[in-house]
């Protein structure tokens, strides 16, 4: 305020402490997050979206935050931000909390929501937890009970040394954003380990994937659902 310039240094400091005490915890966390994001190169006028406040309020109030992270993911995608920048910014938030990083449920909700906007009309179906071969078979059976659509392939991406469990997912989503015809219309995406993720793509996009991502396995799917399910499980486990 203009009147602040007439305050003595001591009075100004006292006023600042009073204002700080009366801020909500959510606002304090938001301001710390904003400062950290600015250091990472985010422009302050572009950084804030309503999802920021939804996330900080949920965290300080101890509420389930999945819906808030989903809101943030959608808003970042709508604003044209990539999934890597979006996830890096959430990690900046958790640095302010002196935490190792966001929980799996938070990242899963954010990634799923981001993909629903950035990759539409493709429907990415993300498995939040690490999947088993049996899970892959069951998920595939839910999608294709009678016949496998022509022109599909199973894709596994590996990122040696990855420890977050999300780097391979990030690579895939970035590739999908650059190549809209990459994924199958229904694209289940399962993390098999911190290093490997498996999904379904269009067979004719195989060359594009290989040009963008290293360490990939791609196998065309047979039309028989049981045979296709077994192939997906083998690729997911790294046997093909």
Image (tube, rainbow, N blue to C red):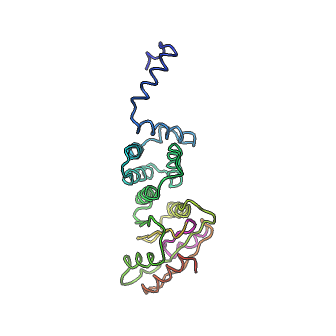
x%, y% of residue 146?
Answer: 36, 84
x%, y% of residue 202?
Answer: 49, 74
- Residue 78, compared with residue 204, is above or below; it is above
In the image, residue 46 lies in the stretch drawn in magenta: no
Residue drawn at the location 45% of the way across and 50% of the way down: 76
x%, y% of residue 201?
Answer: 49, 72
| Number of on-image labels | 0
Residue drawn at the location 63% of the way across and 63% of the way down: 161
- Residue 224, compared with residue 1, is above or below; it is below
User: Magenta residues, as a range?
Assistant: 194-210
Residue drawn at the location 55% of the way across and 62% of the way down: 171
Residue drawn at the location 50% of the way across and 55% of the way down: 83
Q: Quick check: 195 left or right of 74?
A: right
In the image, residue 197 lies in the stretch drawn in magenta: yes
Q: Nearer the viewer, residue 125 or 184?
A: 125
Q: Quadrant of the C terminus?
A: bottom right
x%, y% of residue 72?
Answer: 42, 50
Tell me where residue 167 sits by quadrant: bottom right
Tell me where residue 148 sits by quadrant: bottom left
Q: Quadrant of the N terminus?
A: top left
């Amino acid at each position: 305020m203009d009147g602040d310039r007439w305050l003595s240094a001591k009075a100004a400091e006292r006023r600042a402490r009073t204002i700080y005490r009366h801020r909500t915890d959510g606002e304090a966390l938001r301001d710390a997050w904003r400062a950290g994001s600015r250091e990472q190169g985010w422009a302050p006028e572009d950084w804030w979206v309503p999802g920021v406040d939804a996330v900080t309020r949920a965290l300080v109030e101890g509420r389930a935050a999945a819906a808030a992270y989903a809101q943030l993911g959608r808003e970042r995608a709508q604003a044209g931000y990539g999934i890597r920048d979006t996830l890096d910014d959430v990690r900046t938030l958790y640095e302010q909390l002196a935490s190792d990083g966001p929980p799996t449920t938070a990242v899963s909700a954010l990634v799923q929501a981001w993909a629903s906007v950035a990759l539409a009309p493709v429907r990415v179906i993300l498995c939040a937890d690490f999947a088993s071969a049996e899970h892959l078979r069951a998920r595939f059976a839910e999608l294709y009970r009678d016949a496998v659509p022509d022109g599909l392939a199973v894709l596994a991406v590996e990122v040696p040394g990855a420890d977050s469990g999300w780097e391979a997912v990030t690579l895939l989503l970035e590739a999908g954003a650059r190549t809209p015809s990459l994924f199958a219309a229904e694209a289940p995406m399962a993390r098999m380990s911190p290093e490997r993720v498996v999904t379904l793509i269009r067979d004719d996009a195989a060359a594009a994937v290989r040009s963008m991502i290293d360490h990939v396995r791609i196998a065309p799917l047979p039309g028989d659902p049981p045979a296709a399910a077994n192939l997906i499980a083998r690729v997911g486990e790294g046997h093909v």
